[in-house]
């Protein structure tokens, strides 16, 4: 790894889970980890409920914009993390990819802000573990 480890979080639209993970990682790791996010098929904006539940824990992603995966960045980061079952990334030689099959409360009939809080908490726990792993 480089002197400052780097991670790219990827979901399909880059409007929800990957933006949440990136925001939470920036909050957890500060400048000890270079953090990026992207989407396989980026949407137009950050999900309003995703931004709202992060604001509840002091993380602001409201100014973020969904972006496509940059192939150069994909080759340069130390780790790619895909969030959810639908975000597939073709691994680049030497770049490890891990998938976080995140909690999906809607499968249990939980929707709206309650759903997003559960998703946030699941991602936050995974980010905390990853931040520790990347800095050691």
Image (spheres, helix red, strand yellow):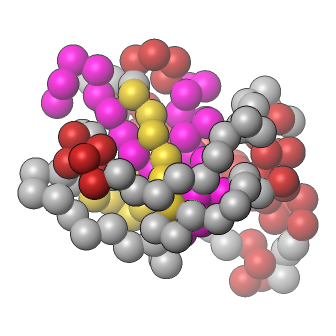
Query: Which residue corresponds to the image point at 89% horizontal and 59% vertical from the top-left?
Result: 113
Q: From what the image shows, is residue 121 above or below residue 61?
A: below
Q: Is residue 19 visible?
A: yes
As rendered, which of 97 and 62 lies closer to the eye? 62
As rendered, which of 32 and 73 lies closer to the eye? 73
Q: Is residue 97 left or right of residue 11?
A: left
Residue 104 in the magenta stretch? The answer is no
Q: Is residue 88 left or right of residue 13?
A: left
- Image coordinates of residue 40 in percent, x first then y, are 46, 67
Q: Is residue 79 visible?
A: no
Question: Residue 118 sits in which quadrant?
Answer: bottom right
Q: From what the image shows, is residue 12 above or below residue 134?
A: below
- Image coordinates of residue 4 in percent, x first then y, are 29, 20
Residue 21 in the magenta stretch? The answer is yes
Q: Residue furthest left?
A: 93
The magenta region covers: 1-28
Q: Is residue 23 left or right of residue 86?
A: right
Q: Quadrant of the N terminus?
A: top left
How many discs mark residues in the rendered view? Answer: 0
Query: Which residue corresponds to the image point at 73% horizontal and 36% vertical from the top-left?
Result: 63
Q: Quadrant of the C terminus?
A: top left
- Image coordinates of residue 68 in percent, x first then y, are 47, 58
């Amino acid at each position: 790894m480089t002197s400052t480890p780097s991670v790219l979080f990827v979901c399909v639209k880059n409007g929800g889970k990957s933006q949440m993970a990136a925001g939470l990682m920036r909050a957890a790791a500060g400048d000890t980890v270079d953090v990026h996010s992207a989407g396989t098929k980026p949407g137009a904006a950050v999900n309003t409920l995703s931004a709202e539940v992060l604001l509840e824990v002091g993380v602001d992603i409201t100014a973020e914009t969904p972006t496509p995966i940059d192939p150069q960045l994909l080759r340069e980061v130390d780790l790619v993390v895909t969030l959810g079952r639908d975000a597939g990334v073709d691994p680049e030689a030497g770049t490890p990819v891990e998938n976080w099959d995140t909690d999906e409360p809607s499968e249990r009939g939980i929707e709206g802000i309650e759903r997003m809080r559960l998703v946030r908490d699941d991602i936050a726990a995974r980010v905390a573990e990853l931040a520790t792993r990347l800095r050691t």
